[in-house]
């Protein structure tokens, strides 16, 4: 398995979090990265975590590296591609 480490940031709250994303090497989502529900929750709580705040995206990020959502499966895993705005 191949993993990629990415650091997401939120330039509104001056916070960051690192995630280790799994590259899907076969199947429907081949070539995309998988983000588990636990990673999503941890990222959002670390980057923002303020109820009702709309500063970030699904993962709480704003600015820098952006995870573009491709799809979500029945287990609430997200499949993303990585876009680096820097």
Image: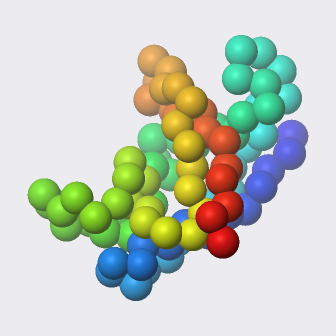
Horizontally, residue 72 falls left or right of residue 14, namely: right
Which quadrant holds the C terminus? bottom right
Question: Would residue 56 be found to the left or right of residue 4 on screen?
Answer: left
Is residue 64 among the parts visible in the rendering? yes
How many numbered marks appear? Answer: 0
- Res 47 → quadrant: bottom left
13 with respect to 8 (left or right): left
Residue 7 horizontal/vertical position (percent): 62, 69
Q: Which residue lies furthest to the bottom in this view?
A: 14
Q: Residue at x 71, y 15 (%)?
A: 28
- Residue drawn at (73%, 62%) of the image: 5
76 is higher (above) or lower (below) than 73: below
Horizontal and vertical percent position of residue 52:
13, 57
Q: Where is residue 36 in the image (x, y as percent from the top left)?
A: 53, 41
Q: How is the image coloured?
A: rainbow
Q: Please report the residue visible at 77 percent of the width from the left and 15 percent of the height from the top.
A: 27
Quadrant of residue 68 in the image?
Answer: top right
Q: Residue drawn at (31%, 68%), measured in percent from left and top? A: 48
In which quadrant is the N terminus drawn?
top right
Q: 15 or 37: which is nearer to us?
A: 15
Looking at the image, residue 26 lies above or below residue 61: above
Whether residue 41 is visible: no
User: Residue extending furthest left?
Assistant: 52
Q: Residue furthest front?
A: 85
- Quadrant for residue 18, please give it: bottom right
Above or below — where is 72 with respect to 54?
A: above
């Amino acid at each position: 398995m191949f993993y990629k480490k990415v650091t997401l940031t939120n330039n509104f709250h001056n916070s960051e979090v690192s995630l280790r994303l799994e590259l899907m090497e076969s199947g429907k989502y081949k070539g995309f990265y998988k983000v588990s529900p636990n990673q999503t929750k941890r990222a959002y709580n670390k980057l923002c975590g303020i109820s009702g705040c709309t500063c970030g995206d699904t993962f709480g990020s704003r600015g820098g590296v952006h995870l573009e959502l491709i799809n979500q499966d029945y287990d609430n895993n997200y499949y993303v591609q990585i876009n680096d705005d820097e």
